[in-house]
Image (cartoon, coloured by chain):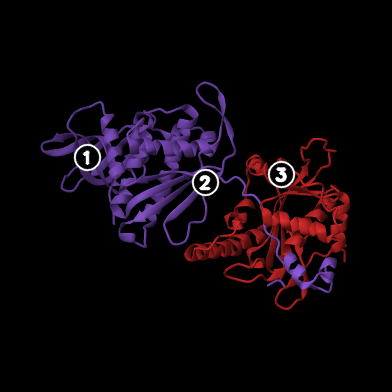
Amino acid sequence: MREPRKTDFRPRWLRTLTPEAELEFAEMPPNGSVPWDWPRITTRILMHDHGYRLSLRSVSEVTQLTQKLADYAGYDVVYGPNPNFADLRSLSSEVTRFTKLTSEPFEVGSFTIPARFESDPVEIMNDVNKSRYETDQIAMRFADMLGSIESSTNVTDVSVGALQTLSALKGILNREASSIEFSLSDRTGTAFAVRKVNEGFLNQVRDTIKSRRSSREKLETLEGRVTELDIVECKLLLSVGDVRHRVKGDFSSMFTPSLRESLNRRVRLEGIVERRDSDPSVIHIQSVEMLDDE
Amino acid sequence: MIDTKESCFAVEDSIDGEYFALEFEEVGERAQEHLQSVWQRLNLALDSHAKKEDLAAPNWLSWSPWKWTTDKREAYANRQKYVGWCGSQLAGILNVWPNFTPDVPGNTGATGLYIEHVACSPGNLTTSLWARRYNSVGTAMFAFAVFLSREQGFQGRVSLHAVDAAAVRFYRRIDEKLGGGLFQTERQGIIGPTPHGNESDRNRIFFETTVLGAEKLLQVYHA
């Protein structure tokens, strides 16, 4: 411990002050204004039955999916809403730097994950011209995307990639949480939206995805473990309970965000199933749900 | 540590009345750790207590100096960040902006240091949970800002916006104690150099030291 440097010197006015006046100068009111904050997304995981434990897998999934949602929101800000957009790999590095969320120390006593957008304003060339963007816009778009689903208005503006990312939160809800809350605030520190992802919300997400399917063919569900995954060719192999051969699967790139984490994990896949004899042999995947492994 | 030359920014230990010289440095790793681990926890404890007991929380509880010190945004790149130490205790903070010229009609073009934040640490304020440890830290921090201004070539000129009535009273009292002339005429409507100044400064009273007043203040701490 560093010792304070003792001195015999007394500031001049303190030598002549009355005790009452000395008291006045003893304490100066802190002076200054609160500077701009960073636009932020604070994620709060509400546990089943007020539980006090959470698997690291869920923590990791929530943070990764939150970043992905921010990336989709950032895409919309820069290029405009595109319902068909699903491939985050196509984002330029300047956009991903712009949408990058950085976590602050987690709060004590709850599963609350504060994260902020730290990027300075940027100028990015979109499809038409070079424009200036601020991270407040990403936070706003994030709130709008989830708000559109909540209120079923302008939901056609929400990209399918964002919808898939939201539906991937279902795994955490199945396992451990009753809901996940996103609180949004801007650089003035003003909280402007709270969006809650719970079972009802995810049902709306599922319905929205279903309503966008071109095929009206009958869909079936297969549960199993993904044993091989090729995200370039968009193919996978699925090991299903009693079925002797592994089931081949193909999927659109919009499912890449959800399936990237699926290798060696249990999943529920919905899609058009082709059969050899009575066993499923191929599934053309239309929806993905991660299941609890624990 | 910054060499304060002939000045000694001494503060009084409220326990035994002994005097100790504050030591100043630009914010570094040591200060950052202290702000995150000690200052932040004192804030949290006080905030929780105020909420539980339904007490009015002091305004400075909304401050997060542990975040400001790591702020890398371009908009805040000109902010200079200092801390004052009393041994192992972080006594106070000072955030200043150099080269600020207040934009006022008839301004003579005097440029100085603008004080964005000046404050003693929570431990040097009496609160509902603890008593103040060192006396007169805030005044020493303010005087150090004047010293810095002189060192940076601004002849001791510093300016600030008083955030509330208590701050206005305090700076007027310093002026009185020095026999007047510490500040230029008080003004309103001046916007400071910070990015958020447009939102916060317009209605606040603006204080700006005179060169002579600054010299008088430094004489108080001349050892």
Estimate the spatial distance between the alpha carbons at disc 1 and disc 3, rounded to whole Å.
61 Å
Q: Chain of mark 1?
A: A
Q: Which residue is mark 2?
A: A116
Q: Quadrant of the N terminus of chain B?
A: bottom right
**Residue B53 left/right relative to A225:** right
Disc 2 residue type?
Arg
Chain under callout 3: B
Residue at image location 61% in from the left, 62% down from the top = B39
Q: First in sequence: mark 1 or mark 2?
A: 2
Left or right: B29 as drawn, with respect to A245: right
- Where's residue A26, x and y in %? 73, 67
The purple chain is: A
Q: Nearer the viewer, mark 1 or mark 3?
A: 3
Real-space Cα separation, disc 1 to disc 2, in angstroms: 42 Å
Q: Is residue A231 in sight in this rendering?
A: no
- Provide the secondary structure element on which disc 1 rests: strand
| Residue at the image position 85 percent from the left and 49 percent from the top | B210
Give the structural element (helix, strand or loop) at label 2: strand
- Using the numbered discs, state the Cα–Cα distance from disc 3 to disc 2 in whole angstroms: 22 Å
| Shade representing chain B | red
Residue ID for mark 3 = B78
Question: Which numbered disc covers residue B30?
Answer: none
Seen from the viewer's position, the closer of residues A235 and A171 is A171
Read off the residue under disc 1.
A247
- Decide which of A121, A240 is in the foreground and name it: A121
